[in-house]
C-alpha cells in the first residue's frame, strides 16, 4: 500500500488509509487478473459453492460503488493524488479484465440472480465517476460493459428493494445513450411510493423491516435513478424533490443512530456490511444535501467514528488483507446464507465523502461532536421531530384497507 504523506488533514488521511486497505486486495488483484485465484470465499457453512459464482462481481461492483467519487475528486494534495491516480488506473484495468472473455478474471453476468444486484452496484459506481472511469475506458470495453449490464435482464427482480437494481441498470444505460427500458424504472419508483411508511422510511416491499436496507439500497438508489433520468424526462422532477425531502429526514435519523463510541444498533439483516449501513448518510454528505441543522463536520466526525469502530476492530481482515465476515472483528455467525467475502465490500460506501475536495466544508471545518455525544454529555439540544405524512399517503393506506375490509 502506498504511504500517504504530506499536508493532508488528519481525518482525511485516516479515511484514505482505511479505504486503501479495504480496496487494495480487490482492485490490485483484479487489475492483475488474479482476483479469482487470490480472493478467499468465506461464507455460511454449505454455501461456498453457490457463492463462488457471484462473489467476485460482488467485490468489484461494491468496491467501485464506494471508491468511485474519490477516483474523480480534484483539488487534492500531491500526496493524495498519487494514490488516487493509482487506484483510478487499477479500477479501469479491473473493468477491462472483468468483461474480457480472454481474461482470467472475466465475469459472466448471467450465472445467478445475485448478479443483478452487483451489476447495479457496478452501474452506480460508473455513474459516480463518469469522467474518470466511464469516459476514459476504451470504447470496446464500454460496449462490453453495456452488453453485460443488459444481459442481467434475464433475471426478474423480486418485489422488494431488488426492483431498484433493475431500475439502476436501466437508468445508467439511458444516461450513456445505450438502449434502455423505461418500465423497470417506473415499476421501481411506483412501488416505493406505495411502500413509503412515513418519516423518511420505506418498506422493503409492503412490509417494514427493522434493518438498514433503507440505507444499503433504497434511498441511495432511488436518488441515483432519479438523478440519471431527470435530464432525459423532466417529468420526474416533482417526485425527485419529494424523495430528497424524505432522504434528508432519513439522514438525520441515521446520524442520531451513531452512539458516542461510534457503535450503532446491530439490528436486522446484513450486519456484516459493517459501516456500509451508513451508505445513505455518506451519500447525502457527498451530495452536500444534508439537513440544514446537520453540519457537515458533525457528519464527518460521526461517520469517521463508525468507520474506525467497524473496520478498526482486530481480526476484521485476514492475513492477506481480505475482509472477514463480522461487524467488529471476525464474527462468521453473522453471515446469512447470501453473505460471502465479496458481499462485505459494501462497507466501502461509507467513504463516499472522499469525493469532496479537502477545501469543502465537510473536510475543512473543525471536528464536531455528533448528536448522541452531545446529548449523553449533557448538552441541551432541541427535541427531534418527525416529518408529517405527505398528502396521499394516508389516502393510499385507507384505500388499501377499504379494499381488504370492505366499506365501513
Image: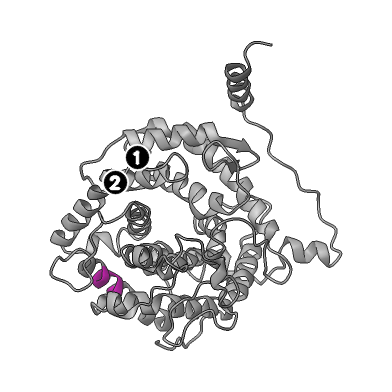
Q: Residues within 10 Å of mark 1 (few under 14, many from 20)?
A: few
Residue 93 is inside the magenta segment: yes
Q: CA distance from mark 1 to mark 2?
A: 9 Å
Residue 320 in picture, x, y percent from top left: 41, 86
- For this rendering, which residue is in front, 181 or 320? 320
> Which residue extends farthest top?
407
- Pointer 2: what residue? 175
Q: Nearer the viewer, mark 1 or mark 2?
A: 2
CB under 8 Å between discs 1 and 2: yes
- Please state the extent of the stretch shown in magenta in the rendering: 89-94
Quarter of the picture holding the N terminus: bottom left
Residue 125 in picture, x, y percent from top left: 36, 59
> Which residue extends farthest front?
46
Q: Mark number for residue 142?
A: none
Image vertical order of residue 155 relative to residue 108, above or below = above
The reply, left or right, for residue 223 in relation to residue 263 is left
Image vertical order of residue 241 relative to residue 5, above or below = above
The reply, left or right, for residue 1 in relation to residue 271 is left
Amino acid at each position: 500500500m502506498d504511504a500517504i504523506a504530506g499536508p493532508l488533514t488528519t481525518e482525511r488521511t485516516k479515511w484514505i488509509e482505511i479505504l486503501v486497505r479495504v480496496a487494495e486486495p480487490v482492485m490490485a488483484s483484479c487489475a492483475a487478473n488474479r482476483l479469482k485465484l487470490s480472493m478467499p470465499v468465506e461464507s455460511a457453512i454449505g454455501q461456498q459453492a453457490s457463492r463462488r459464482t457471484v462473489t467476485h462481481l460482488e467485490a468489484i461492483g461494491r468496491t467501485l460503488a464506494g471508491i468511485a467519487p474519490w477516483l474523480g475528486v480534484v483539488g487534492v494534495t500531491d500526496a493524495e493524488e498519487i494514490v488516487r491516480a493509482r487506484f483510478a488506473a487499477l479500477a479501469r484495468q479491473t473493468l477491462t479484465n472483468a468483461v474480457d472473455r480472454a481474461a482470467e478474471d472475466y465475469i459472466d453476468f448471467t450465472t445467478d440472480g445475485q448478479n443483478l444486484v452487483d451489476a447495479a452496484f457496478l452501474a452506480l459506481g460508473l455513474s459516480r465517476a463518469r469522467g474518470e472511469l466511464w469516459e476514459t475506458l476504451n470504447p470496446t470495453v464500454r460496449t462490453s460493459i453495456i452488453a453485460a449490464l443488459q444481459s442481467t435482464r434475464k433475471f426478474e427482480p423480486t418485489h422488494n428493494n431488488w426492483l431498484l437494481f433493475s431500475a439502476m441498470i436501466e437508468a445508467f444505460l439511458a444516461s450513456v445513450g445505450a438502449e434502455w427500458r423505461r418500465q423497470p424504472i417506473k415499476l421501481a419508483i411506483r412501488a416505493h411510493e406505495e411502500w413509503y411508511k412515513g418519516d423518511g422510511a420505506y418498506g422493503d416491499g409492503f412490509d417494514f423491516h427493522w434493518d438498514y436496507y433503507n440505507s444499503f439500497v433504497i434511498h441511495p438508489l432511488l436518488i441515483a435513478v432519479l438523478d440519471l433520468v431527470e435530464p432525459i424526462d423532466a417529468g420526474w422532477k416533482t417526485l425527485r424533490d419529494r424523495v430528497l425531502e424524505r432522504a434528508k429526514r432519513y439522514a438525520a435519523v441515521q446520524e442520531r443512530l451513531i452512539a458516542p463510541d461510534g457503535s450503532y444498533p446491530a439490528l436486522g439483516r446484513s450486519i456484516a456490511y459493517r459501516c456500509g449501513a451508513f451508505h445513505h448518510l455518506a451519500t447525502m454528505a457527498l451530495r452536500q444535501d444534508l439537513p440544514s441543522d446537520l453540519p457537515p463536520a458533525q457528519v464527518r466526525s460521526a461517520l469517521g467514528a463508525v468507520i474506525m469502530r467497524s473496520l478498526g476492530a482486530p481480526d476484521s481482515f485476514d492475513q492477506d488483507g481480505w475482509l472477514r465476515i463480522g461487524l467488529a472483528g471476525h464474527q462468521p455467525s453473522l453471515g446469512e446464507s447470501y453473505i460471502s467475502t465479496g458481499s462485505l465490500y459494501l462497507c466501502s460506501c461509507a467513504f463516499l465523502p472522499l469525493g469532496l475536495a479537502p477545501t469543502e466544508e465537510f473536510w475543512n471545518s473543525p471536528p464536531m461532536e455528533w448528536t448522541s455525544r452531545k446529548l449523553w454529555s449533557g448538552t441541551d439540544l432541541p427535541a427531534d421531530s418527525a416529518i408529517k405524512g405527505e398528502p396521499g399517503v394516508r389516502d393510499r393506506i385507507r384505500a388499501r384497507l377499504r379494499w381488504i375490509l370492505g366499506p365501513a
